[in-house]
């Protein structure tokens, strides 16, 4: 049984089509004071239920609004006898705050995990968590972490042809993510793929860097991989550094395109040849007319989730 809490989600429709399963009907009433009532319109008793909700903020709902509604709907389904309830959350809000970096800091990812567990979530599927180890350690219920580079592979193969290629991380924290993609590409392309990392430091929201590039990128097409693009400043800084180091072209790749604040201006930078993101977050914040939007390509992560859900349901059914 498959539910979507966003009736306009193209991701949910694509996932339902990939699974060949219809989206189950549910009632969503909004009261005058802004409270919500969500209930399934089909009986979940004994069923294996999956709820799709990507927790990005938008004009209609904040991340905490969406999180609250998702948690309440999970609890409702468990109250009415669902055998298993899986949260399918392509973009997981609050995942970036996974450790204490200042005195009295919260560890918000762990608190979110405790909320999911408290309402009886059986398992959680996410796409490209900010820090995979922190994500997996935060949850006591089973989790499935999907890597965005698997969605990018087909597009990238057409982009790079036979030219020299490297994968780069825009900061030290993303090194493992970039290395996994480099290893995967070497196997699929059957040729060497380079690796690079750009120095970056952040304190109190301010990013600083000396544009230091570790790795060889001269005359290469560089796939610059991150978990998300927010303001675009990290990608711009990294692309400029790679260009100065001799890169032929830089393709900015990220699982989640949030595109907040002045992202359109940052990503319009000539050092970024193309931008590739998944459909975990629709690119509604990027102006339709503009350099950044003209460079944008959105690939669907729905097939990745469909494979994972089908495998999970088959194992549960057996």
Image: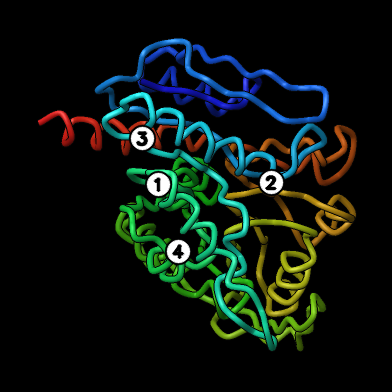
Where is residue 242, by image quadrant? Answer: bottom right
Q: As rendered, which of 29 and 62 lies closer to the eye?
A: 29
The circle on residue 63 is 2
Q: Nearer the viewer, mark 3 or mark 4?
A: 3
Assess disc 1: are there few (<14), some (14-19) or many (≥20) residues with their C-alpha within 10 Å of its C-alpha.
many
* Residue at left offset 80%, top offset 59%: 231
| Residue pictured at 63% horizontal, 72% vertical | 170
- State the residue at coordinates (57%, 59%): 227
Q: Earlier in the sequence, mark 2 or mark 3?
A: 2
Estimate the spatial distance between the alpha carbons at disc 2 and disc 3, rounded to whole Å.
Answer: 21 Å
Which sits in the foreground, 5 or 133? 5
| Dot 2 crowding, Cα within 10 Å, few <14, some 14–19, many 20+ | some
Q: CB atoms at circles 3 and 1 under 8 Å apart?
A: no
293 sits to left or right of 7: right
Q: Which residue is mark 1?
A: 124
As rendered, which of 160 and 72 lies closer to the eye? Answer: 72
Nearer mark to the viewer, of 3 and 1: 3
Does residue 113 sit above or below 4 in this rendering? below
Name the residue that disc number 4 marks.
135
Image x and y of residue 280, in percent: 58, 40
């Amino acid at each position: 049984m498959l539910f979507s809490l966003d009736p306009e989600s193209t991701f949910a429709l694509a996932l339902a089509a990939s699974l060949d399963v219809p989206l189950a009907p549910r009632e969503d009433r909004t009261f005058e004071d802004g409270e919500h009532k969500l209930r399934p319109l089909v009986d979940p008793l004994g069923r294996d239920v999956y709820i799709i909700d990507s927790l990005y903020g938008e004009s209609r709902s904040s991340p905490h609004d969406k999180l609250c509604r998702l948690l309440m709907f999970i609890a409702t389904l468990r109250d009415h006898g669902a055998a298993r309830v899986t949260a399918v959350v392509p973009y997981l809000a609050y995942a970036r705050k996974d450790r204490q970096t200042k005195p009295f800091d919260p560890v918000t990812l762990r608190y979110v995990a405790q909320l999911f567990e408290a309402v009886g979530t059986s398992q959680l599927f996410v796409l490209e968590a900010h820090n995979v180890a922190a994500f997996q350690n935060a949850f006591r219920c089973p989790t499935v972490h999907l890597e965005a580079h698997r969605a990018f592979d087909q597009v990238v193969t057409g982009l790079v042809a036979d030219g020299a290629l490297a994968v780069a991380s825009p900061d030290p924290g993303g090194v493992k993510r970039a290395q996994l993609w480099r290893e995967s590409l070497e196997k699929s392309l059957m040729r060497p793929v380079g690796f690079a990392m750009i120095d970056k430091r952040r304190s109190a929201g301010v990013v600083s860097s000396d544009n230091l590039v570790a790795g060889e990128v001269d005359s290469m097409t560089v796939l610059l991989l991150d978990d998300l693009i927010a303001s675009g400043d990290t990608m711009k800084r990294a692309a400029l550094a790679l260009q100065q180091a001799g890169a032929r072209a830089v393709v900015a790749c990220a699982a989640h395109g949030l595109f907040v604040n002045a992202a359109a201006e940052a990503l319009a930078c000539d050092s970024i040849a193309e931008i590739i993101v998944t459909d975990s977050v629709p690119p509604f914040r990027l102006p339709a007319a503009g350099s950044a939007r003209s460079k944008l390509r959105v690939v669907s992560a729905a097939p990745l989730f469909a494979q994972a859900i089908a495998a999970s349901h088959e194992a549960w059914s057996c």
